[in-house]
Image (cartoon, rainbow, N blue to C red):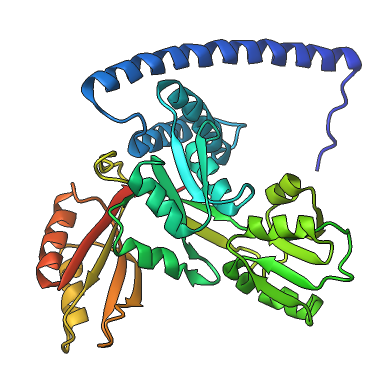
Amino acid sequence: MADAPEFTAPELLGFRTRIDALDRELLALLNRRAALALQVGELKKQEGSVAFRPEREAQVIDGLKAVNAGPLKADSVAPIWREIMSACRALETPTRVAYLGPAGTFSEEAALGFFGSSIVKVPCANFDEVLHATAAGAADFGVVPVENSSEGVVTRSLDLFLTTPLFIIGETSLYVRHQLLRRENSLAGISAVCAHPQALAQCHGWLSIHLPNVERRPVSSNAEGARLASLDPALAGIASERAASEFGLHVVAPAIQDDAHNRTRFAVLAHPHQHPQPKASGHDCTSLIVSVTNRPGAVHDMLVPLKVHGVSMTRFESRPARSGQWEYYFYIDLQGHPDQPHVAAALSELRGVCAFFKLLGTYPIDVH
């Protein structure tokens, strides 16, 4: 590996002067973009259309990634432009987003990653409240976790999807790094570890080795566990670095999740009366809930239309219908958008063979 070049103080000053000048140019260009966004916002108000269009923002980011020549990495383009679009969108109208609170949860981090930081935060006590706030209009969008790479589906979210009037307009995923947080910078003297049940499960192996005799106390969220740990020196919480900063806690042990690649997928929901279904972006997912009558070959018949029309199924989960008859609802993700003829044909035939059929949403996904 070649040695890094050495620069003199005057050379560094020259680089910094050039960077400062570029920053001023960037700020001027961003303000020009914001002015155009305001004009677009006025047109949207006249047309009665919504400010946030996930498929449009996905297309903008995809287009920029395609023309990016570096050295800025392609993965850095998306978060930069989400913040730019978030700030411009906030000039049109405030975007209220509900998520599992309090401050410092991974749900909050997912919401900020998807919408950018220029939002009105609506933290909620549980997943039920997130959906209720969004359905009632207290929030424009709701963000809930649906699946973890190590622990599987978040069952409460799936059960709520069955009856909610909301539908999915987007998704985002997050690498989840669990930190053990405490007022004291030591593992000694911990009486209980407080965290959401999913986090406790995701850290089961580490806790069994390092804190085998310590109580594992389930709470409503990881941030709530961090808050409790901030009040009692005998407690520890499992949460994010953001929560550590929020509650003034030490990171006693970093990255204690059992799966080094631990990742959680979040669904972004809206009310169909307030937000239109996203149009096709070119890389979309369609989510369904279906059930079939309890007869031989019913599940096979349900899948035949997908094969016939060449529609790929990317996810298939079952949940009991709680009818006492050993019946199940199936949660399915399909590749594609109903505006595509082969997807529309498959959905039409699938609806015909199902006893229950609910389109949960169709939305752009990040394929990069």
Relative placement, left or right, of 134 versus 310 is right
Q: Quadrant of the N terminus?
A: top right
Residue 212 location, quadrant: bottom right
Instruction: Look at 72% across and 66% down and name the residue there.
Output: 256
Q: Is residue 12 visible?
A: yes
Which is more toward the observer, 283 or 233? 233
Q: Is residue 95 above or below residue 24?
A: below
Q: Is residue 267 visible?
A: no
The percent coordinates of residue 329 (x first, y second) are 28, 74
Relative placement, left or right, of 176 versus 207 is left
Which is more toward the observer, 247 or 366? 247
Instruction: Look at 78% across and 79% down and name the residue there.
Output: 209
The percent coordinates of residue 272 (x first, y second) are 25, 45
The percent coordinates of residue 334 (x first, y second) are 29, 60
The percent coordinates of residue 260 (x first, y second) are 66, 65
Instruction: Look at 84% across and 62% down and name the residue there.
Output: 233
Q: Is residue 233 above or below residue 317?
A: above
Which is more toward the observer, 151 or 14? 151
Number of marks drawn: 0
Instruction: Look at 38% across and 52% down and name the residue there.
Output: 132
Residue 227 location, quadrant: bottom right
